Image (tube, grey):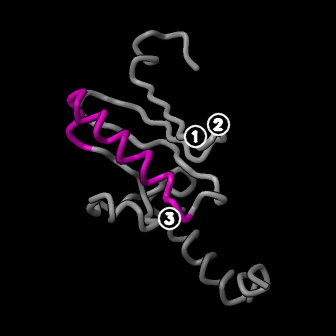
């Protein structure tokens, strides 16, 4: 994953298996007392057993024992975050493509025009 020992020590991966088959995984990055949840998912074949939630409860207990105090689960809410105890944080602004200012205004106007054109309805169909 990384040749830098300091970065490698910050990376944590976990895999939950059922009868040898992967059921859920998670990848996190620890920065001091803060854990960033980078990626996680589960096999839909095991969905009714909530393997992702089970794995993350295990990860949280292990992280707390190592001194982690907060977890940043990123933007969005797929439901499980609230169940685990997450609270909404500050709004995130993605300035990668359109920084604030004239470019963002043009982007907003283009978005309105795109939606009015019916293109989004066609894409959903």
The quadrant in which the C terminus is found is bottom right
Give the labeled residue for mark 1. 17
Is 115 contained in the magenta span?
Answer: no
The local crowd at label 2, few if under 14, some if 14 to 19, many if 20 or more residues have their Cα within 10 Å, is: few
Q: Main secondary structure of the magenta part?
A: helix
Is 53 contained in the magenta span?
Answer: yes
Asked whether, in this view, residue 60 is left or right of residue 15, the answer is left
Earlier-in-chain disc, 3 versus 1:
1
Q: CA distance from mark 1 to mark 2?
A: 5 Å
Give the labeled residue for mark 3. 102
Residue drawn at (46%, 17%), measured in percent from left and top? 8
Q: Nearer the viewer, mark 3 or mark 1?
A: 1
- The magenta span reads 48-70
Q: CA distance from mark 2 to mark 3?
A: 54 Å
Residue 123 appears at what percent x and percent y?
Answer: 77, 79
Q: Where on the picture, by quarter, is residue 109?
A: bottom right
CB under 8 Å between discs 2 and 3: no
Q: CA distance from mark 3 to mark 1?
A: 50 Å
**Relative vertical location of residue 25 with respect to residue 84 in this rendering, above or below:** above
Residue 15 appears at what percent x and percent y?
Answer: 54, 36
Q: Nearer the viewer, mark 2 or mark 3?
A: 2
What secondary structure is marked by label 2?
Answer: loop
**Relative vertical location of residue 12 with respect to residue 96 in this rendering, above or below:** above
The quadrant in which the N terminus is found is top right
CB under 8 Å between discs 1 and 2: yes
Give the labeled residue for mark 2. 20
The local crowd at label 3, few if under 14, some if 14 to 19, many if 20 or more residues have their Cα within 10 Å, is: few
The local crowd at label 1, few if under 14, some if 14 to 19, many if 20 or more residues have their Cα within 10 Å, is: few
What secondary structure is marked by label 3?
Answer: helix
Q: Where on the picture, by quarter, is residue 111?
A: bottom right
Residue 81 appears at what percent x and percent y?
Answer: 37, 60
């Amino acid at each position: 994953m990384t040749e830098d020992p300091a970065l490698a020590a910050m990376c944590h991966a976990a895999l939950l298996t059922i009868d040898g088959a992967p059921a859920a995984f998670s990848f996190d990055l620890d920065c001091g007392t803060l854990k960033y949840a980078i990626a996680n998912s589960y096999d839909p074949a095991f969905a009714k057993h909530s393997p992702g939630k089970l794995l993350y409860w295990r990860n949280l207990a292990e992280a707390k024992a190592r001194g982690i105090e907060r977890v940043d689960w990123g933007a969005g809410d797929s439901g499980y975050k609230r169940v685990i105890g997450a609270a909404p944080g500050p709004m995130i602004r993605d300035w990668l493509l359109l920084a604030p200012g004239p470019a963002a205004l043009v982007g907003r106007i283009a978005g309105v025009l795109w939606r009015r054109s019916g293109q989004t309805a066609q894409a959903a169909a």
